[in-house]
Amino acid sequence: SSRLPQTVPFRGSHWQTSLLGFRASLPVRAQPKKKKKVDVKREQAQKDRMKKKIKKLEKAAPEMVPIEDFITPLKYSDSSRVRSLAPLSSEETERRVLLLKKWCVFKQKQDKAEKQAIQALVEAQQEALKELRLESEELYQAAIKRDEQLFPFERDGPTHTPPLPGYDPPEGKCVDITKVYTQ
Amino acid sequence: AAARPRPWRLFGAMCLLRLPRITQPLEKEEEEMTALMGQIELEKSHYSDHEIRKLEEEEQLRRRKESMYDDDEMLGKTVIMAQDLEDKWEQKFLQFEAASRITDADKNNNRTSLDRRLDSNLLLLVKQKIGNQDLWLLPQVEWQPGETLRSTAERAMAMFLGDHIQAKILGNAPYGIYKYKFPRAIRTEDNVGAKVFFFKAFLQSSDLSQAELKEDYLWVTKDELGDYLKSEYLKKVNRFLLD
């Protein structure tokens, strides 16, 4: 087997024309030539296979993100956690049923009153608009135009006690531990 | 052809409401229901980690008292019991004092203050001269040609409370109308009476120290309106005021 010089480029052989064109000028055997073509073909086949695999993975449906609120952690279904309270007496159940019935009636009255109030509001507004129309069509048209600045309408709701003037809330640090799933 | 001018004079009035800052007290049925809901929730729930810890510690204490064995395991360990934690939290809570729901203005019945009756809507009333009478009214001003009624109402508000007032007017349409005929002495063919159109707005700015209130003014709730407004006017105003 001929020892092919690897590291030191030399000018001994008459096949070599320049120092730089070393590898190309040597007469390579037929075998290495086949290797090159087959290599190229093999490499291309490998690349195609990889691409097909990638396409398959992408086509597969994305994994669903689990909703942590709907999965009860196992430690809470332990039977030792069940509360032990005295069973309800019949008077208690009786009282509860009557209270629920009273609540139904109370809520029904409240709802009816609310609906009547809204109805009265609408009637008053319709009457006002009717009178306005009698006065001047131009003002009427300006009045029934949509108010773009009304929405989005934001308002802070009422609290149980009014804000304490000069109150300094205690310092605290909030660490966010929500799990973020990427698809 | 120009339309014949109508004999009614137009006014725009602003009904400025200060919305409630605290919740209304619960009715009797509501209180009973909240108690019942709390009880049912307690019955249906399971023990939490804190409660289990508390039960176990109570169990340990009881066993130690009964059997009186040496607590070598406990030597060197300072244990904070769940009960101690609860006591500490209770103490801390008792130290905090919230602001009172009934303010000083409530006690003095100072009707010009905005801090009165924090749980209900407050409405602005001003004293205006109509004809030759001084009446308590919602701030109103005569309409001038070239402006919409809404801007008339805004002008009325600015006239009595200054330009720096921040209020959210609820829409372009009037909420109510009060029309009246002038007394026969002033009534003419062209000047039969007046129509006052009411607009509603919510007060956004919480302090009115910058307001230049020149006339007499009051902030009253819906049930106190009867003390100041005339009956016909009051009837029309009540129609578009929610409790």
Image (spheres, coloured by chain):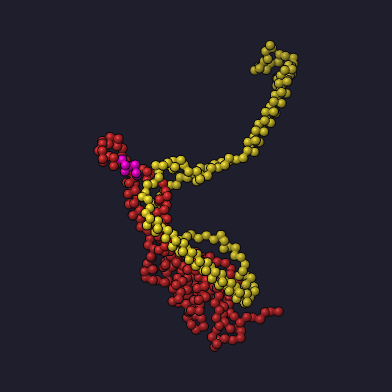
Report the magenta stretch's main SS.
helix
- First to last magenta residue range: B54-60
Quadrant of the drawing holding the N terminus of chain A:
top right
Q: Which residue of the protein is positioned furthest toward the left in this rendering?
A: B68
Quadrant in which the C terminus of chain A appears = top right
Image coordinates of residue B151 in percent, x first then y, are 57, 70
Judging by colour alone, the chain drawn in red in this rendered image is B
Which residue in the rendered view is the most extreme toward the top?
A1
State which quadrant residue B24 falls in: bottom left
Q: Is residue A156 above or below residue A183?
A: below
The answer to whether any part of residue B124 appears in the image is yes
Residue B22, relative to residue B156: is it above or below? above
The image shows residue B79 at horizontal and vertical percentages of 32, 40
State the image coordinates of residue B184 (x, y, percent, origin top left): 55, 87
Identify the residue at image location x=41%, y=68%.
Answer: B116
The residue lying at 61 percent from left, 65 percent from top is A146
- The answer to if B49 sits in the magenta stretch is no
Q: Is B118 left, or right, of B169 in this rendering?
A: left
Q: Can I make out residue B12 in this image?
A: no
Q: Is residue B96 above or below residue B4?
A: above
Residue lying farthest bottom?
A: B185
Q: Provide the letter of the chain coloured yellow.
A: A
Residue at figure coordinates x 49%, y 64% from the top left: A108
Nearer to me, A87 or A7: A87
Report which quarter residue A90 is drawn in.
bottom left
Give residue A17's position: percent from left, percent from top: 74, 18
Q: Nearer the viewer, residue A176 or B59?
A: B59
Q: How many marks overall?
A: 0
Q: Residue at x 42, y 71 (%)?
A: B112
